[in-house]
Image (tube, rainbow, N blue to C red):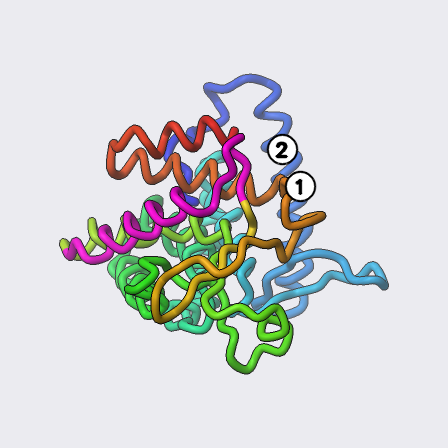
Amino acid sequence: MMCMACSSTKSVSPFIQENVGFAKAQLGLAIDTIEASGKCLNPVTLNEKGEVYYCGYGDWRSGFFPGSIWYLYELTGDSTYLPLAKKYTEAIRKAENLTWHHDIGFIINCSFGNGLRLSPDTAYSNAMKQAARSLTTRFRPNAKVIQSWDVKGNSWQSKRGWECPVIIDNMMNLELLFEATKLTGDSAFYHMAVAHADRTLAEQFRPDGSCYHVVDYDIETGAVRYKQTAQGYADESVWSRGQAWAIYGFTVCYRETKDPKYLAQALKTF
């Protein structure tokens, strides 16, 4: 989730400038609140009391706040955002070692990925490489997929009877692997991303282009066990956020591989 086409608002329409201004106000309020607290926190949403809920580095959303500050720095050209973007990115560095879920791409691409793009730093590239290595520990060679959630020790997951659940959200994490190959020269990251994309392409979509949220695989044989949902109305319903994950993920795969089948799936899902 690294913006490849953002530019200064000076050359864009009033509509875009208006929306960037709104984002600046919203993020500015969040920054002021957090800075006043003396803590380094990641705001996510409001709780039932109307209070801000903050997440830790291991939460799949932890990279969104620093990533948003990087985007605001890029869009406005305001240098006062640069030290803040660096500060909140560094605050989630421990995420580079996450191995117990697949969302490390969400976390690291938004924060360190945008940092590397907008303010190149060896520390950022090192975080990207380590995060990719952490993500590859979840690759299951028999199924040729990156397992999304752990089942052992997770009562909710185990009740569903899953062994190796893969959710469509995982397509968002492949960009990290593609970037890791560019940074290291090691094509193993690239090939894992392609293997996961190919298996997802074969198993996770319906004929009309919509996708299942969860496909569960047999760890030993790699065979499909279930096609279900964990989020969305029903197993056969269309979950709009999942559709967006698929569109983005397969568009990235097309960008990185130039294989037209990925673009075709993104368009069909759209």
> Which residue lies under the disc numbered 2?
21
Disc 2 packing (10 Å; few <14; some 14–19; many ≥20): some
Q: Is 237 rendered above or below residue 35?
A: above
The span shown in magenta is: 186-211
Which of these two is toward me, 197 or 26?
197
Q: Position of residue 240 (x, y in %)?
A: 62, 39
Report how many numbered discs are placed on residues in the image. Answer: 2
Q: Residue at x 85, y 63 (%)?
A: 49
Q: Amino acid at mark 1?
A: Ala
Quadrant where the N terminus is found in the figure: top left
Q: Is residue 24 left or right of residue 223?
A: right
Q: Residue at x 50, y 19 (%)?
A: 12
Residue 200 belongs to magenta span: yes
Q: Is 26 rendered above or below residue 156?
A: above
Q: Position of residue 134 (x, y in %)?
A: 33, 69
Which of these two is toward me, 203 or 134?
203
Q: What kind of element bears circle 1? A: helix
Q: Position of residue 166 (x, y in %)?
A: 47, 58
Q: Amino acid at mark 2?
A: Gly
Q: What kind of element bears circle 2? A: helix
The mark found on residue 25 in the picture is 1
